[in-house]
């Protein structure tokens, strides 16, 4: 069971703790809804599902959001004797961002394990079964001499609470993204990356009641994404991106992913 727990955390790690974006919050009274399909694969393993989110600026500079919810269609290994399935509801993240200055945001994500955590014949459950916090700051800017270009960045700490005798080590996440809207078009290509580093080792309590460390502090992962957004009108945009990640298995491992989605601003 412990090995299954480690595997489940690794498989859903890239879907957790993703703030809405790295840019300033929407004006007061505005919000947006997004939904998209994702597909990840690496060798014999693959997963796919539906990702949903909604955000709203309740007052000037304060945004609240529901992130990462949806439905996982499958997460399975295509090999003899491997567990199949991994379908069901995904976990939910309650998020908040406050715009301290025109270029600086503070954020807090609260991860709730409300998804399907049944291993059974499913093998890879959609839920981490873990309550966790992700918090930090963002910096973004536009260049007056380069209309259409904007840059955003983020630094945060990912802290998982102990559950089922297991406690994930504290992680630091560093990310950045550059967007450029091509003049006289509605097309915005973008390029981003994120680096994750485990600061402290994972710990678990064995059947004998003793606590043991996984000796995995220093493990890391780098994730790069490339894509483009197309604005159908000022309020509706379609986005597609390719995501490539590489790193240690307990940090999400290696995989390639595709995401296609739509966002509606209201």
Image (cartoon, rainbow, N blue to C red):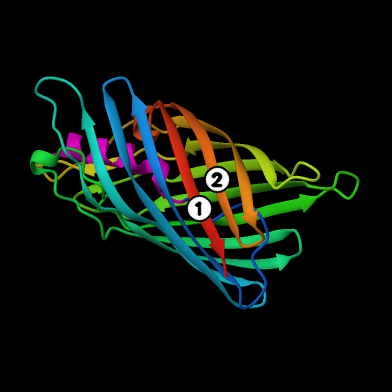
Residue 10 magenta: yes
Residue 190 lies left or right of residue 220; in this view the side is right
Q: Which secondary structure lies at badge 1?
A: strand
Q: Which corner quadrant holds the C terminus?
A: bottom right
Q: Taken as a whole, is the magenta stretch helix, strand or loop? A: helix
Residue 89 lies left or right of residue 142; in this view the side is left
The spot of residue 31 in percent (x, y) is 56, 69
Q: Quadrant of residue 44?
A: top left
| Marks 2/1: CA–CA distance | 6 Å
Q: Is residue 24 above or below residue 204?
A: below
Q: Which secondary structure lies at badge 2?
A: strand
Residue pictured at 33% horizontal, 42% vertical: 12
Residue 156 lies left or right of residue 203; in this view the side is right
Residue 184 in view = yes
Residue 233: numbered disc: none
Q: Which residue is mark 2?
A: 239
Magenta segment range? 1-17
Residue pictured at 18% horizontal, 37% vertical: 4
Q: Which residue is mark 1?
A: 262
The spot of residue 181 in percent (x, y) is 74, 44
Residue 53 magenta: no
Residue pictured at 13% horizontal, 41% vertical: 122
Label located before the other in sequence (2 or 1): 2
Q: Is residue 61 above or below residue 110?
A: below
> Mark 1 and mark 2 in contact (Cβ < 8 Å)?
yes
Q: Which corner quadrant holds the N terminus?
A: top left
Callout 1 crowding tier (Cα within 10 Å): few <14, some 14–19, many ≥20: some
């Amino acid at each position: 069971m412990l090995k299954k727990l480690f595997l489940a955390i690794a498989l859903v790690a890239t879907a957790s703790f993703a703030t809405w974006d790295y840019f300033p919050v929407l004006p007061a009274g505005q919000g947006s809804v997004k939904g998209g399909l994702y597909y990840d694969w690496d060798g014999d393993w693959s997963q796919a599902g539906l990702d949903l989110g909604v955000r709203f600026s309740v007052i000037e500079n304060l945004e609240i959001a529901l992130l990462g919810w949806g439905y996982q269609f499958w997460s399975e290994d295509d090999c003899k004797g491997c567990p199949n399935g991994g379908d069901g509801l995904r976990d939910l993240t309650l998020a908040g961002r406050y715009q301290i200055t025109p270029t600086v945001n503070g954020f807090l994500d609260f991860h709730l394990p409300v998804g399907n955590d049944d291993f059974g014949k499913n093998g890879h459950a959609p839920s981490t079964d873990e309550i966790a916090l992700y918090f930090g700051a963002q910096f973004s800017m536009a260049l007056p001499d380069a209309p259409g270009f904007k840059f955003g960045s983020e630094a945060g700490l990912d802290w998982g609470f102990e559950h089922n005798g297991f406690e994930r080590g504290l992680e630091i996440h560093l990310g950045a993204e550059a967007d450029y809207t091509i003049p006289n078009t509605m097309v915005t290509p973008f390029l981003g990356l994120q680096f994750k580093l485990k600061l402290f080792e994972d710990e678990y309590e064995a059947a004998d009641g003793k606590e043991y460390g996984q000796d995995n502090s220093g493990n890391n992962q780098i994730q790069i994404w490339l894509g483009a957004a197309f604005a159908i009108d000022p309020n509706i945009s379609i986005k597609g991106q390719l995501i490539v990640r590489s790193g240690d298995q307990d940090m999400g491992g290696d995989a390639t992913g595709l995401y296609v989605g739509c966002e509606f601003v209201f």
